[in-house]
Every structure is written in C-alpha cells, then in structure tokens.
Image (tube, rainbow, N blue to C red):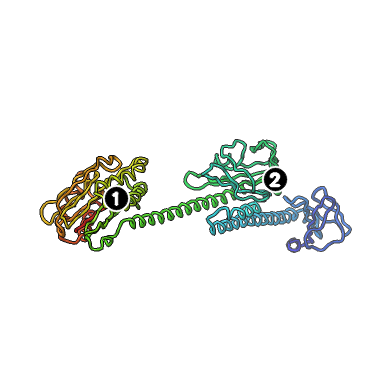
Amino acid sequence: MADALGALAGASVRLWRFDGRSLRKFGSAADPGFTPPIPLTTGLVRTPTGSVWLAPVPRANGFWLELAGLPEARAVELAPQLTGIVAAFFNAERETAGMVEELTGVYKEIDLLYAISEILGHTTILEEAAPTIVTEVADVVGARRSSIMVYDEATGLLRTVAARGFSAEGLQPVEIDDPHSVAARVFREKRFIVYDPTDPLAQNPGSQDSRDYKSQAFLSIPICYGPGGRCVGVINLTERLFGDSFTPSDAKLVSAVANQIGAAIENARLVQRDLRRQRLQRELELAHDLQLKLLPAPGVLQGDAEVAAICRPVDNVGGDFYTFTRLGHGRVGVMFGDVSSHGFSAALVMALVMSAAGIHAGAGSTPDEVLASMLESLGDELASTEMFLSVFYGVLDPANGRLIYANAGHPHAFRIPRSGEPERLPTTAPPLGLSTAASIQRNQVNWEPNGDLLCLWTDGLVDQGSGSGFTEERLLAEIVRRRTERPEAIVRAVFTEADKATPRPADDRTLLVMRI
C-alpha cells in the first residue's frame, strides 16, 4: 500500500507505528536504517537522511504516515489526503475482520444447531443424546459446566439427565416450587435468567447456600414446546471460560437449542404414547380374539342340532355370551345371556359365567337348578362388582317334543314355529345378581323337531327407543320371513338389516338361532 501511495504522490511513503516506546516501521516498505523521533504533532521531522513530513493517521491510534522527497508545501497539501486513504483502508480491514469473526461465530452456531438436529434425529430417547448436547453447547458458548434437567411429570421434579464439568450421579431432583433453585425458577417463569458477576449492580438470583458456582456467571434457559410454551426442562450453563458474562447472543443460541430439545422431548413423548396405544390396541385385539374363542363353535353339537350365532361387542370385548351342551339321547342344552354394562368389566364377568356354565350345565340338572348353582358360584363376584346378568338356559328334547327352560330376566327369547306367530319365552326369575336361588323357576313348552326355531338375542341388537331403528318387530319379521332357511343364513340376514338401521350401535349385539 505504501508503494502505491508513493507512486500516486510522487514521493517516498512509509508507515510507522508507535509501540509505546518508539516508532517502528510498519508494512513492507524498505527499512531506512533509522527510527524517526516521536513527533508531538504533524510537521517536519529531521532524520539522518534529511527532513521528512510525519502526519498521524486518523482513527488509527499510534500510526504515522511519512512523506519524503517533497517540498513542504506539497507535503502539507497531500498529507490529509493520503492519511485519509490509509485510515479508510484500516477501517475496511477492521470491518472485514469483524465480519469474518461474526461469520465464524454464526457458522459455529449453525453448525451447533445442525449437529444437535442430527443427534436428536437419530434417537427418541433424550438421555442418549443429552451428554453430547451439553458438551457441544458448552464448547460453543464457552461454559466450563453445563447440564440438562428434564421435568418428570410422574413425580413433579426436575431431574438432571446429563452434565458436563461435574457428575450428575447422586444429584437430587429439584422440586419445581423450590424458592432457592435457579432452574426451578426458570421452569416456573418460562424465561431465561442470566447473571454477570462483573456487574456491581447485578443481584445473584441463585441459592444462598455454598454452591461453588454462586459467584460465577451462569445462564439458565427454559426448554419449552408446543402451544402456550409448555415447559419440559431447563438448560444450565455455569462458569464462563473467558471470565466474563454470557451474552445475549449466547442466550439466543441456547434458546434455539432448547427449542430443538423441547421438540425432541415432545416427539419422544408422542412416540411413547403411540407405542403404548399400539401395544394396548394389540392387547385389545388379543383380548377380543380370546373372548370370541371362549364361545363354542356350532360343530361342538356334532349333528345334534343346526345352530348359528354372531357376537359383536361394541368395544373390543363385551359381556354377551352363549354356550351349548350335549346332554345325550339327542338332548341339547343352550345357555345365552348378557352381562350388565360392556367393555372389560363385563368381559371378565362373562369369562367367569362361561366357566361356571361349563361346570354346572353338564351335570344333568334341570335348567332352574343349573341357574341356581351358577348364582351360588357367581354371587360374591356379582355383589362386589355391583353387576348382574340376564341369562336363558333351555334344554331341547326332540324325542319328547319339548323345551324345558329357566329364564332369569332375559327378555329376548322366542320360539319361532314352522307356521304361525312367534312365541315369547317369558322370564321365570329376576336376573342373576338381583335374585335368590329360591326365586328361580322353570317352564316348559312344546317343540316340533326340525320345524321350530329357538331365537335368542341381546338388547343391543334392537332399538328400545322410538321404534325408528331396528326394532324387535322388524327382527322377528325378518326371522319369520326366512324361518325355513338354514340358521346361518337367517343370522347373516338379520345382522345385515340391523347394520343398515343402526350403523353405530351403542351396546354389544349377539344373535343365536337353533333348529333341532
């Protein structure tokens, strides 16, 4: 630059810099072999080779411009112009250096955010990523110690999941209403807290105990996510390596990191919730399959009767049930019922009923005795759960042309004759759980083998309201219209009509049709 200025001015140009004791040559210009005396102001200075003109460079403390080989008047004229050019050059250099430094800082920040995004993108478990994150953040902002604390919803405590500069093992969780904890205060107020120990007016908001960071600079940032800024944790940075306080830029950068962590925590929470939902769904599907397997297949009757049944719980599991029993000599026992309510509680009682039915129905007792024995077995469970069940149990005896049955509060039991009107099989006792064993009676009706149909269904299949849906009358009319068809065809046709009339049933639905 000095050579270019010299060529422009037609003179010899050098730059000198005051080092606190003397002037030192600055730049690549030739060394004159001497050091000029320290001037007090602009003007001529005598040197071993003659007088030279020295002028200070504006806004460049300690720099002087030397002009040699010019008349004094010409030096006076050119000095302001040349020193102005040098000052502009120095200023551009400073701005360039500042921009480079700023860009370097921005690059580090971008690189940090990208690195953390990559870390969090490869795991849904924050504890796996947290040690790397605290190290990366501490390195970029210059903190000797750092930590990440996460809010545990189950305990209501902030627990440290990772730390740098100290061990997190053995650290006690922090209560979120702790009045002395900076982290708890940041969590509660959802705003960052920064402390500058070099500021005499700054008040340390930290604990009054003997923590070793008490007099050190620190920065605590809330980890927030979602609408309303739900706080899920805190990032703590302590002991600035360079001895000064954390800057607003540091707070801005760490807040961006906190947002990423907040999103990762929320994502992990949603993933875990989805996994739990999927696990629950699989368990519900398994429970549904297992419950339906408790219900016997028509094949168990081995040709003694034609039977078809469909059971559709409104939830994955329900309280409707049926079972068959071969009693010998062509006789068949049929049990059908409905546990009050639906869902898992009803399904558990239903499983107990099926177990009790398997024990008592095969004993050869009369239907009323079977229901009385079942009430004795199930009474305590029904009382403790405050549940009851309507149940029909009948024994079809085609050889003697009769149906003997006991009906504990089940209203939907009918004999559909080969011709003529349907015959309701009225109740002979209150529902089990609302009755005593002594109150259970039995009844008997005639039965035409290979002609009559036994039809049983639960109240979820018919509309008990205004009659605009699938009513008992519509159901019976459909069965009567198809009574000469196979039971399987009848059951399918009834459910088709029921689905059309009531696409969103509110209760479990079961229908059984038997011909013997």
User: Looking at the picture, how far across and down is residue 289, in whole percent?
Assistant: 36, 57
Look at the numbered disc 1 and give the secondary structure of its residue.
loop
- How far apart are the two marked residues, 2 and 1, measured between alpha carbons? 71 Å
Which residue carries the number 2 mark?
244
Residue 103 in view here: yes
Residue nearest the viewer, comparing 308 with 21:
308
* Number of other residues with Cα within 10 Å of mark 2, as a class: few under 14, some 14 to 19, many 20 or more: some
Q: Is residue 31 left or right of residue 224?
A: right
Residue nearest the viewer, comparing 168 with 506:
506
Residue nearest the viewer, comparing 89 with 470:
470
User: Looking at the picture, how far across and down is residue 275, in whole percent?
Assistant: 46, 55
Look at the numbered disc 2 and give the secondary structure of its residue.
loop
- Quarter residue 464 falls in: top left
Instruction: Tally the numbered discs.
Output: 2
Q: Is residue 113 left or right of residue 44?
A: left
Q: Is residue 193 left or right of residue 83?
A: left
Residue at 56 percent of width and 50 percent of height: 256
User: Looking at the picture, how far across and down is residue 285, in whole percent?
Assistant: 38, 56
Residue at 15 percent of width and 58 percent of height: 449
Q: Amino acid at mark 1?
A: Asp
- Mark positioned earlier in the residue sequence (2 or 1): 2
- Say which quadrant the N terminus sits in: bottom right
Which residue carries the number 1 mark?
508
Q: Amino acid at mark 2?
A: Asp
- Say which quadrant the C terminus sits in: bottom left
Residue at 32 percent of width and 43 percent of height: 376
* Number of other residues with Cα within 10 Å of mark 1, as a class: few under 14, some 14 to 19, many 20 or more: many
Residue 205's place in the image compared with 9, above or below, is above
